[in-house]
Amino acid sequence: CAAIGSRPALSALVIASNVARAISRAALTQVTPFFIVALAQARSAFSGDYRGGTRWARQGERAASRIGCPLLAECTHLRGLYEIYELPAADVVGFHREARRIAMAVGSFQGVSWGLLGEVCYTNMWRGVPLEQLVATERAERDLMVRAGDAVGQHHFAVVASYAEFLRE
């Protein structure tokens, strides 16, 4: 919450502190992989080096997969946000689809929301898929987002719908 709200520096401090603790102990807790992936965002927010965050996102997602982290779907989605700096957008959409698949398998509403958000907004809209394809995808996934989505995912879906409506007028 601090990262999205008015205290991003506090969020970055908490994230970096948790990762530093894990490194010094040479041990992972169930949620440490999420902090490792989140370090990519915290680091990029202050340094502007988004490509450099990819390494942290990859390592965190791999650790999440290795230890059975309950936040694997979220880690996979966040990795997709950073792989876009090194891979074609068409290849990155797979990370968001995999995040949604994982989340649906374990019943993670947040993971489903983030996977949908990543695919529809961060990948499809940003890369400029044809408008009709974007509209069709948003409509096809809207009910799932309403049922499973968190506030951020639902808000971004509304932005996609509004954007598409504006362009169609």
Image (cartoon, helix red, strand yellow):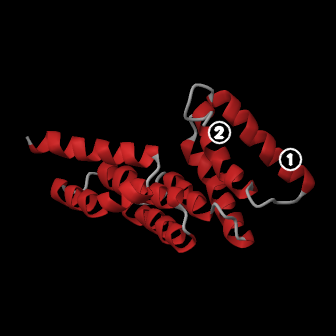
Reading the image, the residue beneath label 2 is 43
Query: Local crowd at mark 2 within 10 Å, few (<14), some, or many (≥20)?
Result: some
Residue type, mark 2 in image: Arg
Query: Secondary structure beneath disc 2?
Result: helix
Query: Outermost residue, front direction?
Result: 147
Reading the image, the residue beneath label 1 is 21
Above-or-below relation of 77 to 18? below
Counting from the top left corner in percent of width and height, residue 76 is at: 56, 62
Answer whether labels 1 and 2 touch (C-beta < 8 Å).
no
Residue type, mark 1 in image: Arg
Query: Outermost residue, left direction?
Result: 169
* Quarter of the view holding residue 5: top right
Residue located 24% across and 47% down the image: 161
Q: Which callout, 1 or 2, points to the residue nearer the camera?
A: 1
Above-or-below relation of 20 to 147? above
Counting from the top left corner in percent of width and height, residue 42 is at: 64, 39
Q: Which of these two is toward me, 87 or 151?
A: 151
Residue located 85% across and 52% down the image: 23
Residue located 55% across and 43% down the image: 50
